[in-house]
Image: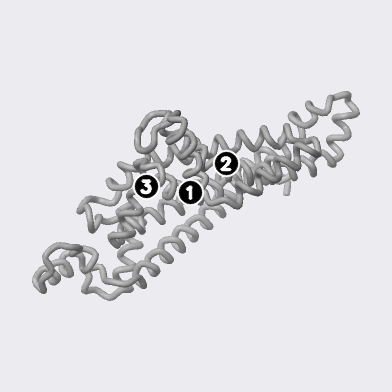
Amino acid sequence: MIVLRRLATGLVVLWAAATAAYLALLAAPGTTVDAIVGEGADTPLIRAQIISEWHLDRPAVVQYLDYLWRAGQGDLGRSYLLQRPVSEVIGSQLRPTLTLAAVAGLLGVVLALILAITTRRPWARRVSSTAELVLVSTPSFLIGIVLLSIFSFRLGWFPVSGGQGVAALVLPAVTLALPVAALLTQVLRDGLDRALDEPFVVTARARGLGERAVLVRHAVRHALLPVITLTGWLFGVLLGGAVIIETVFGRPGLGQVTLQAVTSEDLPVVLAVVVFSAFVYVAINTLADLACLVIDPRLRRS
């Protein structure tokens, strides 16, 4: 029942995201015909051919419903600029972006766990909290520029831009992971503080377990619940941040595709990127909710 309810909610979110993006692009300056013509020859005959080929003479409501019908069947349309199916355009650039987001997310979670567990002393907590506040408040592209200046331009440890190897992935992944780790550390530390005040911790200590064992074996498990709840939102942040970070580091991926599609008003590609991001957000959130049920038996009973 819970899964069905989450699936229904996910469909509503996908519809809302697709509709919002569709209306926003329709309200943008210019027309679809202008976007397709681009810098090519612009004559009344060419415009008439474009209108006929793309069925732009139909009412806006009919075009919208047709778009939803095709999207529901997995047909994302054809790119105005590249004259290729949108699924091919996105599919060819999907792997680098997902790899970057996954590595950054994993690195952020690992860093958060390490910092939340090791900075329990008051002085360490103050230092860590200050660094976390700075990282959360700093735009990711600025962090990327600083890391690029130090480790690429000055030290030469990593490539300046482009590249497909592990070395080219390090700085972009760290750039995305640092703000995520800072936020998760704050949430996880607060969760640990609450968990250590629970009765089961008193019982564990009464059984003779040391403080570190109580922290790692018992408190962390309960403190992870709010972190898991944030996972879907954070992965959405990582995907959105990847668009900017890929541009800063000159990496291939959805960032370059999205930037090109927005500047050229390539409506099908922009809509597909929005729908894909919403789908990933819904899928990750659903998995996170199910993981919470596995971790905490009290949620299953409720």
| Residue projecting furthest to the bottom | 59
Determine whether, in the image, residue 185 is placed left or right of residue 288: right
Disc 2 residue type? Leu
Q: Quadrant of residue 31?
A: bottom left
CB of mark 3 within 8 Å of CB of mark 2? Answer: no
Disc 1 residue type? Phe
Around disc 3, counting alpha carbons within 10 Å, would you say few (fewer than 14), some (14 to 19), or many (20 or more)? many
| Residue projecting furthest to the front | 154
Which residue is depicted at the point 22% across and 52% down?
Answer: 82
Which of the two discs, 1 and 3, labels the residue nearer the N terminus? 1
Q: In this orientation, does residue 202 appear?
A: yes
Q: Which residue is mark 1?
A: 141
Q: Nearer the viewer, mark 3 or mark 2?
A: 2
Q: Circle 1 sits in a helix, a strand or a loop, which is it?
A: helix
Which residue is depicted at the point 25% across and 55% down?
Answer: 79
Disc 3 residue type? Leu
Q: CA distance from mark 3 to mark 2?
A: 21 Å
Q: Circle 2 sits in a helix, a strand or a loop, which is it?
A: helix
The numbered disc on residue 178 is: 2
| Residue projecting furthest to the left | 45
Q: Position of residue 242 (x, y in %)?
A: 44, 46
Q: Position of residue 227 (x, y in %)?
A: 65, 44
Q: Give the vertical position of 101 relative to 36 (above or below).
A: above
Q: Which residue is mark 3?
A: 254
CB of mark 1 within 8 Å of CB of mark 2? Answer: no
How many circles with numbers are drawn on the protein? 3
Q: Which of 97 and 218 lies nearest the eye of the viewer?
A: 97
